[in-house]
Amino acid sequence: MTAFASDVVGVDEVGYGPTLGPFVVAACRLSIPSERSLFELCPRWFSRDPRDYPEKLPVGDSKRLYSTSRRSRRLELGWPTPGTLPDGYPAADFAVLETTALALHRAATGDLPATFGALLRHLGGGSAEPAIPAVYGAEDPPLPLCRELPMRLVCGLGQALAECGGAHVATAAEVYHPARFNACCARVGGKAKLDVTAMYRLGTALAAVHRREAQVVEVLCGAVGGMRNYPVFLPTGMLMARPPGEPGLCRYAVLSTDGRPELFLTFAVDVEDRHPAPALASALAKYIREVFMLMLNTHCRRLAVACGAPPPRPTAGYPVDARRFLADLAPLVASGAVTLHHLVRQS
């Protein structure tokens, strides 16, 4: 495995394929001054196996560890009122995602966000939209959404990293709701280019936070499909630095004025298995998208009840099911209660 710099900004995205709901890019900066893995350094705290939760925090590919198709138990959430949740939603793994998101926030700030909107405002990312657009309803859900979370894990991430000589430095996220996603894709030339540039921009911005002189930072991003020619989408001045014998990895160096590397930018297949920073970023991004989809489903259900229309069945937003959901919403669209411009992604 490639020896990355000890200071790593992991970046990953969630929601590239769906046509409903947001596209979310998140970043997590970790300093772990050791070549040993997080699982070796902190075996009491972290695991690759989600079945070890709630004793340990699962860290890995959010799409693999936290599948919304695996609904082994019904969660009891504090919001909205019990009984108004769409049946079977969210997945049982939602608690793991929320534990990860809140643990990252507390390690970064020393406290817990009171609401989902407060979490989004801390993560920032430069979005010109409101933290919670009206298409998701007017409420700002109080956190945590799950009634029971393992507070040892929520409050102990900073302690766990300190035990292995590391530090959690910062987190950030950028949320592209459908209207903004469509406008950005049209401006930059498609969603693949938006994906690359959004990860690059967020990752390098977080790399600049608390950067010390002569410090080399690694920005480690998830690969975008089968892409291998990232420089065409990135600023000039990057030099290829691909290690020999490393399939599925594209690495570039940004040089300082004296010719020394000051930043490595890497796009890697299975990035969450290469370092914990992008794995934690992936879980954070997925949590944000899952909460927005929960809000969207709940809001549309409430609108339908208020209008006397049949409540739409919940959706995860992927193309085939999205078409079914939009058909369910037809009475609300016809009445003007729902605007497709703010709901559907075109790219």
Image (cartoon, grey):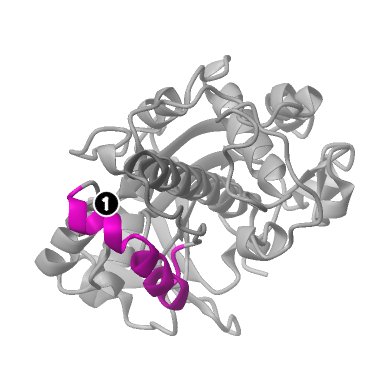
Magenta includes 324?
Answer: yes
* Residue 210 visible in the snapshot: no
Q: Label 1, on which residue?
A: 258
Report crowding for label 1: few under 14, some 14 to 19, many 20 or more residues within 10 A (C-alpha). few
Question: Would residue 230 appear left or right of 64 to someone viewing this image?
Answer: left
Query: Residue 187's x, y, as percent?
Result: 10, 65
Whether 274 is drawn above or below 166: the answer is: below
Question: Would residue 318 appear left or right of 102 to someone viewing this image?
Answer: left
**Looking at the picture, which amino acid does disc 1 mark?**
Asp
Query: Residue 162's x, y, as percent?
Result: 72, 26
| Residue in the picture at 83% in, 39% down | 42
User: Residue 189 sits in which quadrant?
Assistant: bottom left
Image quarter hosting the N terminus: bottom right
* Residue 229 visible in the snapshot: yes
Residue at the limit of the structure toward the front, as seen here = 308
Image quarter hosting the C terminus: bottom left
In this rendered view, identify the residue nearer to me: 186 or 92.
92
- Report the span colored magenta: 317-336
User: Residue 117 sits in which quadrant?
Assistant: top left
Whether 317 is drawn above or below 230: the answer is: above
Query: Residue 20's x, y, as percent?
Result: 36, 61
- Helix, strand or loop: magenta stretch: helix
Query: Residue 196's x, y, as percent?
Result: 32, 66
Magenta includes 271?
Answer: no
| Residue in the picture at 80% in, 24% down | 152
